[in-house]
Image (tube, rainbow, N blue to C red):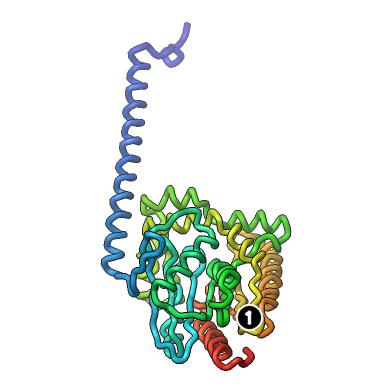
Amino acid sequence: MATREERPLSASARGRVWLWVGRVLVALVGLIVVLLLLGLLYQFLATRIAYRNYPAPGEMVSVYGHDMQIYCTGKASGGPTVVMDAGLGGGLLDWQTVQPKVATFARVCSYDRSGIGWSKSGPTPRTSQRIVKELHALLSDAGGEGPYVLVGHSFGGANLQLYASEYPKQVAGMVLVDSALDTRVLDKDLRKAVAGLQPSPLTIKATAPLGIPRLLASQEGSLPKRLAQERTAIYNGTRHLYAVADETATVQKSVAEATDAAPSLGEKPLVVLSAGARQFPGLTNKQAKRTNEQINDFEAGMTNLSRNSKLVVAKDSSHYIQFDRPELVVDSIRRVVEAARDGSRV
């Protein structure tokens, strides 16, 4: 005879179990819905507060039907004007450790690519080809007169190399600040490992409206406090993060196009700044060392874009040389500006 513990549950007992399971599931679903709504509300309010606390520093210019932000300071001082483009995920705020000092000897403009920072979203895909076309229109509509000294960090370096290829007469010189890597130069196993370090565009777009990136954001320790707070506030807006996701989706194609374009600067001055202390979280020490060596070789090769060029290694600096060694970036820009003015060597 079966004991009491071994007897199967009666129909009424099974019904009560399923009733409680159902209630728990409903409660969990309800909790998830509440958390999602709270995330949406948090992100909406935080973004509105960010734009209220940190108004756009420059002017909005209509480019192909949407407004873009450009921020110009300093005086012409005999030209040329310095134009700066930031790395993936960054905008004009990434240059505010450098721009005020450059403004003492040249007119200098930083800007936000479409969807980035204060700029409104533009059409997709967000390739370097489209970015260069928009930048050309932005500079023309903003009343900027070329030729320009182009200063590009990381992805911005790829964009501006393509700009120099498309509009060579508008270029007086160039400074590449740890310019973006064309991963085709890496060993096959390293290409796969480095690709895994890139955030998923889908993940960025799924989490951005819920405020998750904003909650997880950490401020750059080497930056002045207010600038760090402003970057965190503005760069975690949903529009900004969607633009980052769209640029990320096509970044390797864009960098490859810029590499293949290989602008010939002739005797125009060029300084290539290379980071001396890059970090590769997620790679093994061996992979990181090999990756760093191959990046160094790639960047050293960029000096071949001009017969008047110089390679400068920023020792003890991470990928963001303008944060860790802003004086070195300013000095490099000054060298190129002066060489462009008097035809000297860098």
174 and 182: which is toward the camera: 174
- What residue sits right under mark 1 in the picture? 313
Q: Where is residue 325 in the image (x, y as percent from the top left)?
A: 52, 81
The residue lying at 62 percent from left, 83 percent from top is 268
Q: Position of residue 201 (x, y in %)?
A: 50, 52
Identified by mark 1, the residue type is: Val
Q: Position of residue 280 (x, y in %)?
A: 60, 64
The residue lying at 36 percent from left, 70 percent from top is 229
Residue located farthest toward the top when viewing the structure as drawn: 1
69 and 31: which is toward the camera: 69
Judged from the image, the secondary structure of the residue bearing numbered disc 1 is strand
Q: Where is residue 127 in the image (x, y as percent from the top left)?
A: 53, 59
The residue lying at 29 percent from left, 70 percent from top is 55
Quarter of the view holding residue 296: bottom right
149 and 272: which is toward the camera: 149
Is disc 1 surrounded by few (<14), some (14 to 19) or many (20+) residues within 10 Å?
A: some
123 and 2: which is toward the camera: 123
Image-based side of 23 in relation to 282, left or right: left
Compared to residue 328, the image places residue 282 above or below, namely: above
